[in-house]
Image (cartoon, rainbow, N blue to C red):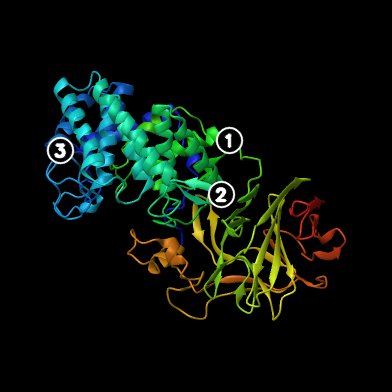
Amino acid sequence: MHLPHQRRPLHDLPDTPQAYDAVLADVTEQALARLTPEGSLEHPDAHDDIGDTSLGITSLLALAWQRGKDPRLPEAVRRSLAFHLRERVHTRDNPGYPNLRVTDSGLPHARYVREAGAHPIGDWPSTVWALLQAVNVLDAADGLLGDDQRTALTRAAHGHWRWLTEATFFNPQEAGNQAIGCVVGGLMLARHLPGDRGEPVRSRALALYTEEIHDRRIPDRGALLPPEHGGAYDNNYGPISLSFLAQAHRISGEEVFAEDGDTLARYLDARLTSGGFDIGGPRYSEQHSGFESVLGLRYFGRRTGTDLGRYRGDTLWGRHAVQRDGRIDGHFAFMLVWQIQDTTRWHRTPATVPVRHQLRSGTVSVAFDGRMTPSLIEASGTYYLPAAVRRRHGFGPVTDGFLLCRPLGEVRVRDVRAHGLAAKLVTQPVVGRDHVLRHVRSLYVTDGTALWVTVAVERLGGAPYLLSGLPYAADDGDRVRRVAEGEVASAGTLRLVHPTESGPDHFDARAELTQEQAAFALAADPRGYGNPDEGWRHLVGSSALEAGPAPGTPEGLHVFAVRYGPGGAFAPLLENGEQGLTVRTEAFTAVLGDPAGDASGEPGLTLNV
């Protein structure tokens, strides 16, 4: 079974001018064949996201005409624009729309679905999208539109802006991507208005960004991020927000967009595995964006020197939005316009400077959460999620069913790179059920092919083991498929256990159910509205790798040693001396300093081959 939206890295898609001209040529032929006598370019099966889709294809035709001067296009652009202005611009309040601040304003807006009152809650983002499609058409209007149509479209776009910022509450879905998109629409619209009307729009757009987005960013893993559906980051919408920040910086030059984009890009780089897999979010866990992410990943990947293009996008949407038959839909067309116009090239070399929340080398990577517990491990093409035991989730020592991975003090981190190896030592002060303070020292070492994890903690009672992850997915060429096992070795006993109970709060890696489906089943609201991250936190138990203590553990300690990925015999030697705990494996020798650390409290780590 393959995960439906985890496909190829987005930088694999050709992005030369010739490739984009081929995309526009295909769009042109589809659009000309679809154009109805009324001028509609909507997909016949489309029923939602309808308010901007015909205009989106119109904008692509306008760009195609600008680049190639196909004589068939001006008439198609004018007819389809006339349809949009006549049929898809609404000035009467949509019955049931809950977010109005001014009723009966008469300001134009777009609807999420055609039928009045059928699904009004989506009207705000649909109006943002319609504004963005409109300003793209206006950008290409010279020599293409007559004065009457240009004036009518400008009036509608200005009306959309006023409806979004005056008649309704701003950003009613608490969706950062929609809010930043609205700001971009205002900045682009301002260029098409006379100075006395354009400057107030630009100023208002910048003020909205500062007050409603920048100043309300949410912290996660040491970064401040634009909020997305009530959370800090969503792996579908976060890269879309990055694209909006790229466009905002391109057209305005305002440094705040560059700075916030750089922060989001570095955060995303730390989350992403080497293979480009990511998971988690307050709206979707596994549904990844496609072409909508390209502009931001490419633009900010180049700015920050990170290979963000490894992000595995949904390449069913590799070029533009499509319906189930694979034919074009105009939704999000503005992103394709912008990525064609932007000439930034992909940065394809990984960043080499160590960062706190990531360890990455070659095909091995570990992404760490805010507690410095792994949120995702990749080794030998397999992806491991944090496992769950008795409602506690993570990687770490378990004693009497209690997982020791929640720090109750400052977490210390030490990075070392030497002899072709990359290592990270994480020291966490934790308290168990016995109320005794212990220091969990977790050493992660990789040569770019395998990952060695050694965890040492003051001696535990009972029969402790190391919760070592939930094998979940693996690379399979151009796709990511579900798995229930991985290539793992342990110095002690190693067992892969599965839940003995059934139900949505017990996740069995052998079942066909995906993590996202299970997370939504546990969420408070329906799929598409619920918070899957919040739902997943209700998980009671899961499939899990459990590693017993390593033999030869020094007195007073429990030490666990696991290797993810290929290798021969695995029998590390452990010794506690004056310099600290020495760990000797077939690939390296490491010395972990005393948990108390040096004069500044920082733990020591030396690494040799």
Say which element carries label 1. Answer: loop
Q: Earlier in the sequence, mark 3 or mark 1?
A: 3
Q: SS for tag 3? A: loop
Tell me the amino acid under the disc marked 1: Gly
Residue 415 image offset from top left, x and y in percent: 71, 49
What residue lies at 18% left-to-right and 36% top-to-bottom? 35
Q: Give x and y (percent) for residue 426.
A: 68, 57
For the residues carrying marks 3 and 1, which lies nearer the camera in this image? Answer: 1
The span from disc 2 to disc 3 (Cα, nearest Å) is 52 Å
Earlier-in-chain disc, 1 versus 2: 2
Left/right of residue 399 with respect to residue 301 in the rendered view:
right
Q: Which mark is residue 36?
A: 3
Q: Quadrant of residue 343?
A: top left
Three-letter amino acid code at the position of disc 3: Thr
Three-letter code for the amino acid on which mark 2 is drawn = Gly
Query: Disc 2 marks which residue?
Result: 222
Q: Position of residue 485 (x, y in %)?
A: 58, 66
Residue at the spot 69% in from the left edge and 70% down from the top edge: 437
* Image-quadrant location for residue 63: top left
Residue closest to the far right: 578
Q: CA distance from mark 3 to mark 1?
A: 47 Å
Q: Which residue is mark 1?
A: 305
Mark 2 vs mark 3: which is more N-terminal? 3
Residue 592, compared with residue 331, is above or below; it is: below
**For numbered disc 2, what is the local secondary structure?**
loop
What is the distance, in whole Å, between disc 1 and disc 2 at their CAs? 19 Å
Crowding near the residue tagged with mark 2, few <14, some 14–19, many ≥20 C-alpha atoms within 10 Å? few
Q: Can residue 394 be seen by looking at this rendering?
A: yes
**In this rendering, which labeled residue sits more in front, label 1 or label 2?**
2
Of the pair 169 and 66, the residue shown nearer to us: 169
Q: Evaluate if marks 3 and 1 touch, with contact meaning CB atoms under 8 Å apart.
A: no
Image height of 543 relative to 57, above or below: below
